[in-house]
């Protein structure tokens, strides 16, 4: 199901990502939901798409996610 606000994201996502990255995750997940909800793979596919969006804009440095240099 789509996430209406950041607070609705899974606790693991909120605990790992800074708020701007959480918004990227939420937006990508919701967009994937709109486009792929009827496809096989279900919600796991939406989460993979959302993580891909985060990884394009952020990089992990130790335990922190930092904006990627462009």
Image (tube, grey):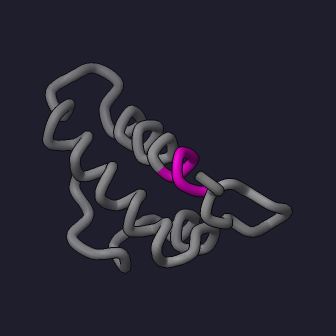
Among all residues in the image, which is located at the extreme right? 62
SS assignment for the magenta stretch, majority: helix
Instruction: Specify start and end residues of the magenta stretch as a single range.
Output: 54-58
24 on left or right of 51: left
4 on left or right of 60: left
| Residue 45 pos. (x, y %) | 38, 32
- Residue at 58%, 65% (x, y): give it: 12
1 vs 67, nearest the viewer: 67
Q: Is residue 11 above or below residue 62?
A: below
64 vs 68, nearest the viewer: 68
- Residue at 28%, 20% (x, y): give it: 40
Among all residues in the image, which is located at the extreme top? 40
Judge whether residue 55 is colored magenta.
yes
Q: Is residue 48 above or below residue 26?
A: above
- Residue at 59%, 52% (x, y): give it: 70
| Residue 57 pos. (x, y %) | 53, 53
**How many marks can you see?**
0
| Residue 53 pos. (x, y %) | 45, 46
Image quadrant assignment for residue 59 = bottom right
38 on left or right of 3: left
19 on left or right of 70: left
Judge whether residue 56 is colored magenta.
yes
Image quadrant assignment for residue 41 = top left
- Residue at 34%, 61% (x, y): give it: 26
């Amino acid at each position: 199901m789509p996430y209406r606000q950041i607070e609705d994201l899974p606790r693991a996502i909120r605990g790992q990502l800074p708020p701007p990255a959480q918004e990227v995750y939420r937006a990508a997940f919701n967009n994937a939901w709109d486009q792929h909800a009827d496809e096989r793979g279900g919600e796991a596919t939406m989460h993979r798409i959302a993580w891909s969006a985060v990884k394009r804009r952020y990089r992990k440095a130790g335990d922190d996610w930092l904006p990627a240099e462009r």
